[in-house]
Image: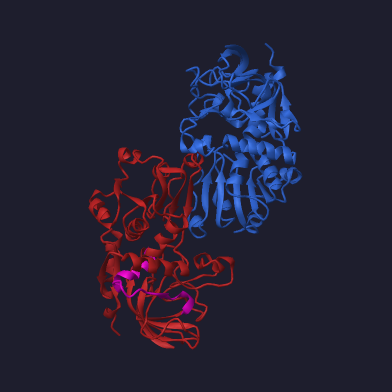
Chain colours: A blue, B red
Amino acid sequence: MSKVVSYAAPSAKEPLGPYKFERREVGPKDIQIEILFCGVCHSDLHTARNEWQNSVYPVVPGHEIVGRVISVGSEITTFKAGDLAGVGCLVDSCLTCPDCGEGLEQYCDHGVYTYNSPDKHTGKMTYGGYSNQIVVDEHFVLHIPENLDLAAVAPLLCAGITTYSPLRHWKIGKGSKVGIVGLGGLGHMGVKLAHAMGAYVVLFTTSPDKVADATRLGADEVVISKNPDEMHKHLKSFDFILNTVAAAHNLDVFTELLKRDGTMCLNGVPEHAHPSPNIGNLIFKRRQIAGSLIGGIKETQEMLDFCAEHNITSDIEIIAIKDINEAYERMLNGDVKYRFVIDMATLQE
Amino acid sequence: MSKVVSYAAPSAKEPLGPYKFERREVGPKDIQIEILFCGVCHSDLHTARNEWQNSVYPVVPGHEIVGRVISVGSEITTFKAGDLAGVGCLVDSCLTCPDCGEGLEQYCDHGVYTYNSPDKHTGKMTYGGYSNQIVVDEHFVLHIPENLDLAAVAPLLCAGITTYSPLRHWKIGKGSKVGIVGLGGLGHMGVKLAHAMGAYVVLFTTSPDKVADATRLGADEVVISKNPDEMHKHLKSFDFILNTVAAAHNLDVFTELLKRDGTMCLNGVPEHAHPSPNIGNLIFKRRQIAGSLIGGIKETQEMLDFCAEHNITSDIEIIAIKDINEAYERMLNGDVKYRFVIDMATLQE
């Protein structure tokens, strides 16, 4: 057992503050990691505040974890002390079901999330990356490329893979016309990744002040989605639209932009339901509305290697952990370009 | 020009009654068909009563047409007088766009429906199959197998292909577990076709009195969709669900029955929107909600040949055309097993 310092939400109504607990012993297949940086995902806020009605307190959020290996279990050959290592949204799954067999652990019925999930090892809940170290089964530990800025890599573990996985699943590449809806933590990664895959990328936003930034990030075009004339020019032209906006909105203005057999994939579950989509939009061009959840471990490694090759990281703002509650408020106001990352050196014992 | 007798709706509020008009001259690429039987589709009723707000009167409905060739144009080599012939929902398309190039004329932006659609040849609206003859471009005329009951073939031209096309598109076959929602004109064809393709077929219905019939038609299981316990047994188990129910209903109870990467395809546009679907159901198993529209001409011929090989037709009740208004009322009450077909010999000049 090792003593850990962290920041935790003691209840839905209280701010996050210091919290001490113990990580499990390093088992033969475990890797112990000193956490250097942890990205701040909107899911952290949802869980800290029990917005999904499933939080068990205290909640130690954080699933965009990068750091260095402290020690490894007796059976570990793929990592050694001092190696860079990363952990994303998953720390366990059954590893025997068809989903796990295909490297799609994120769809396993027995997946264990990095925080606020029943922990097989301790019988308690899992505690995430707002902490100074973590012990994780090697299957769920990623190799982090040495050539990228480490703090800016952290958000790849959730925002990166959540956009990379659907772009790969729907076979985006050269010749594809791809829409990305929303320029936040997910959307800005979607733009960078789709661009690097060779697609023609159109960013949809409601904010005219995001046009310049979207272009800088790799968008070939930026469309203000509240402008029907601008939208109309793109009718029936997209192979794929990745919709990263979780707030309830009219999906029809996007589905009608898809080509025949095109797919719009949603990344977020809205707190209030979207207006019911127009089924005619689907029927008359055999279009599809789909969802996608993070990505599997093998694909996450592939994504990290892709990012290393294309020199892609997240655009980030580094914060001290004492500022996490203020960062949540700024995130709610859309005041972040495009991801907060906690410098874990600011977490003093 | 040839004089035609028909039944037409003179307005949204009046019953259908006799109506005379002229068909165009038989052009070099045209085929003139004596209509022997015409199926009665719910779309006929929607259009006769202007329920889709796009009807131009008089409306001569009917797009499940079978009959015998009377004469053919000078360039026609594939049909001759006396041959059986069929016409479905489409009588024209551009034949040059990518959709047409792939044999998917139903998705062509310039498709012309068999009735209530602007007619390229006459400048008026197209008039459908509630008539004694029709003149159609050969590209849109189907060969009808001689071994099947002709009246019972008629509904294959819409109800048959509308269910066959998505089953083929989503690669249903031996080893697939397929759900069919609703046992009406479309649903009963979906059961027969999916069964003949080798799938394990589960029919979902709200009516316990349909269980015996569904089993007779080829369903391996019948589930009463209002029974949560019965539904729960099938969680996460379907490769594909074909939802033929156009009335607004809760889609979530079906999407959660899909396996990871499974698709629910909708065939009908509801008059009132379905309750907004739970996007979480899509995200957590990468499921999809799709739509599909009839089928292309090549695929319609393939479907007819498949039906000939597997001895599949629609279950029908033959009516005289004078009873069409009563048939519409019975259709609204679900009082038909499973398709009305008009015997066009009852249409007297």
| Left-right relation of B340 to B159 | left
Residue at horizontal 44 percent and vertical 58 percent from the top: B168
Q: Quadrant of residue B48?
A: bottom left
Quarter of the picture containing the C terminus of chain A is: top right
Q: Position of residue A159 (x, y in %)?
A: 63, 36
Magenta stretch holds residue A173: no
| Left-right relation of B49 to A230 | left
Residue at horizontal 60 percent and vertical 31 percent from the top: A42
Q: Position of residue A239 (x, y in %)?
A: 60, 54
Is residue B33 depicted above or below B246 in this figure? Answer: below
Looking at the rendering, the stretch of residues picked out in magenta corresponds to B137-159
**Residue A52 visible:** yes
Q: Quadrant of residue A324?
A: top right
Is residue A124 depicted above or below B333 in this figure? Answer: above
Is residue B140 depicted above or below A92 in this figure? Answer: below
Magenta stretch holds residue B141: yes
